[in-house]
Image (spheres, grey):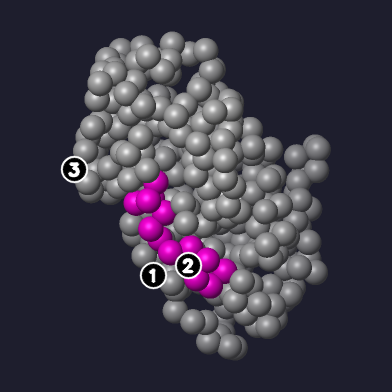
Amino acid sequence: MRLIIRTDASPSVGTGHFMRSSTIAEEFLSLGHEVCFVGKIDPMNLIIERFQELGLGFSVADPKEFRTDNKNDILLIDSYSVPTSDPFITRENWFKTVSISDSITPKYDVDLIIKPSLITRTGLDGGSRILSGPEYIMLRSSITQNRPQVTTGTVPMKILVVGGGSDPSGFCNAVVEALARSPYEFVADVFSDNFDRDLQADQRIRIHKVSLQIEDYARDCDLALTLASTLAIELIARGVPIGIASAFENQISGAQEMLSLGLAAPIGNRDISGTWIIDSAILHDLITSEAFRSNLRSKVSGLIDWLGAHRVALEILSL
């Protein structure tokens, strides 16, 4: 079979669609199947590195020029912007069709819906079968082990700050501003392609361009501050205590879910003008209280087993 992934990625769109659909691509490739990405995918560092991990090089087809085979091709669509009436995604063009769907995804006419949710939902959605819950959380193969247990009293604390694939909301700016005002001893590694704060030589804060180097810091951090995105799920799988916020409409339900399950702490919010308000009291507790962090770690421990992408791939192939 051939898996055709219709998705987009850019500094404005973000990288979430591409990164989560790439986990299924990785599984299909490992099972000996062909994979093609189709859409508008900008060659950002994170994207290029992920293509290299997949062994594909940076290869993206134009939907207008791509020829489909309805006896062999499976369509996987992960998008908010592709119209449901787009001729490319018409079911007649495909052997089977699948969508990765969250709260604002259009109601695509597909055989299977994958909902990247930590809450198990069963039944049908508009006639399409649903896969959801911890057992279907899709992670990259490089995320294979829990992080080492944090030693109480580690000094300085290691904090990871990430605002998504390109940080278009300015989340990192706001978090760093709050951290810079704090008296705590820490080392914060901040990943953002949209950073514009003057740190005035604060040696506690280090700025990086967004790349898969995030992996190295995620394995060894004591705390992460991030958006309710694909990365937040990866950090939960690792057992990292996290503070989260939602910057966009599609992140609201994910944030509510993580907070209602006690898997994360609410680090702040973004008002209607786009201004971030970081909760200094929660930030204080996350940094200073080992008991607070330990409680978060206990909630996420063992929740995700890293086999979700494999299960999803097998479900797709069995359609």
Q: Position of residue 143 (x, y in %)?
A: 38, 61
Residue at the spot of label 1: 145
Q: CA distance from mark 1 to mark 2?
A: 7 Å
- Quadrant the C terminus occupies: top left
Q: Residue at x 44, y 29 (%)?
A: 111
Residue 240 in magenta? Answer: no
Q: Are marks 3 and 1 in contact (CB under 8 Å)?
A: no
Q: Which numbered tag is attached to residue 311?
A: none
Q: Are marks 1 and 2 in contact (CB under 8 Å)?
A: yes
Q: Amino acid at mark 1?
A: Gln
Residue at the spot of label 3: 32
- Quadrant the N terminus occupies: top left
Q: Secondary structure at mark 1?
A: loop
Q: Amino acid at mark 3?
A: Gly
Q: Upstream in the sequence, badge 3 or badge 1?
A: 3
* Whether residue 304 is situated above or below residue 310 in the rendered picture: below
